[in-house]
Image (spheres, rainbow, N blue to C red):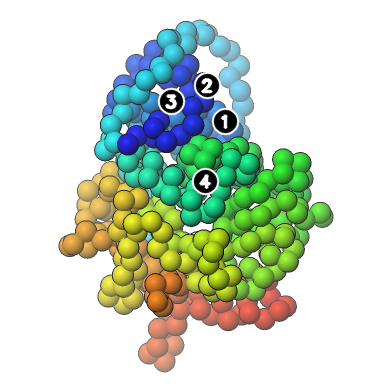
Amino acid sequence: MVLDDVLADDPRVAPVAGGLRARGVRRGDVVSWRMANSDVPMLLYRACWRLGAIAAPVHHLGDTAPPGLVVEDLPDGSPVRAGDAAADDVAVMLFTSGSSGAPKAVLHTHRALAYKARLMVAVHGLAADDVVLMPAPMAHISGLLNGVLVPGAAPFRTVWMPRWDADEAARVVDDERVTFMVGPPAFFVDLMGASRPPRSLRLISSGGAGVTPAFCEEATATLGARVKRTYGSTEAPTITTSGPGDPTERGWTTDGRPVGEAAVRLGPLDELEVRGPELFVGYADPSQTAAAMTADGWYRTGDRAAIDEGWVTITGRLTAVIIRGGENISIAEVEGVLERHPAVRQAVV
């Protein structure tokens, strides 16, 4: 299964793929770009996949001046309507620094991303009448998965934000009747503090240490949406979350259960280890891949966790601890305790 098989047809993809092919792009080539969120990078992703090329976007930090002179306008080439990719071809190369600070190029195949796109439509309970607002950069896994892949598989519409502004986001949510958002809690804290908090959202999926029960309760009351926690990474996108039929309390107090065919276990020091069809196939640097995997093929996330009857709760990073009196104290746990106080919205230790 390749991505063209699961994403709804978009007639704009064929001419973009033709343009890339006319410029010499072939199966296995790496195509990189840096630009703000819009339909353009979405079409570049899909054109690369049709050609069997590897999309390798770079995070967009800011706008640059437009070119002052166009020397030659190259022809578009013939539209490409049939794909050249195979299921196990690498589809994307996404860059992440992780907690180590060392840059890593994460590789995902067509098979893994196609599987994940279809799965998350069902897990989130999404349908063709949903609309997602995507402020996260498209060069990141969240922007790719929830702005390109899941909407393409449902299919439903994505509204792009090139840069985050809370009041503008609140206006766009209401004007576009946005129903679904995914992102860190900072986005939703900003929306709750907007001059006019939006009310059309029905589902908010958020991950990170700041997604406390207090945050979930406040976001539910202020934004009128079902709010739940989720957990994943660039290497292992959306491994755990809760579904529409799960208890609200579990969605607020845990990071959910493994979705689809994903499996989790605890390794030494309670490090969460995961495996499943959505896992990356490795880093571009084989030595980084070897360091991240166990001998029996599980991905070492670097996150500490607890598992209770299948429900996973991330308790912090292996390295994010404070040592006092010989005891290891999780920074995330301290922040969580502080955020239970009604006068505290967010805590950082």
Q: Amino acid at mark 4?
A: Asn
How far apart marks 1 and 3 lie (CA) works out to 12 Å
Q: Amino acid at mark 2?
A: Arg
Viewer-side label of 4, 1: 4
Residue 135 pos. (x, y %): 61, 45
Judging depth in this view, the residue of 114 and 346 nearest the camera is: 114
**Disc on res. 12:** 2
The residue to which callout 3 is attached is: 47
How far apart marks 3 and 2 lie (CA) works out to 9 Å
The residue to which callout 4 is attached is: 146
The residue to which callout 1 is attached is: 39
Crowding near pointer 2: few (<14 within 10 Å), some, many (20+)?
some
- In which quarter of the view is residue 301 placed? bottom left
- In which quarter of the view is residue 253 placed? bottom right
Horizontally, residue 333 falls left or right of residue 133, namely left
Count of numbered badges drawn on the protein: 4
How far apart marks 4 and 3 lie (CA) works out to 18 Å
Q: Are marks 1 and 2 in contact (CB under 8 Å)?
A: yes
Can you see residue 98? no
Of marks 4 and 3, which one's residue comes earlier in the chain? Answer: 3
Q: Amino acid at mark 3?
A: Ala
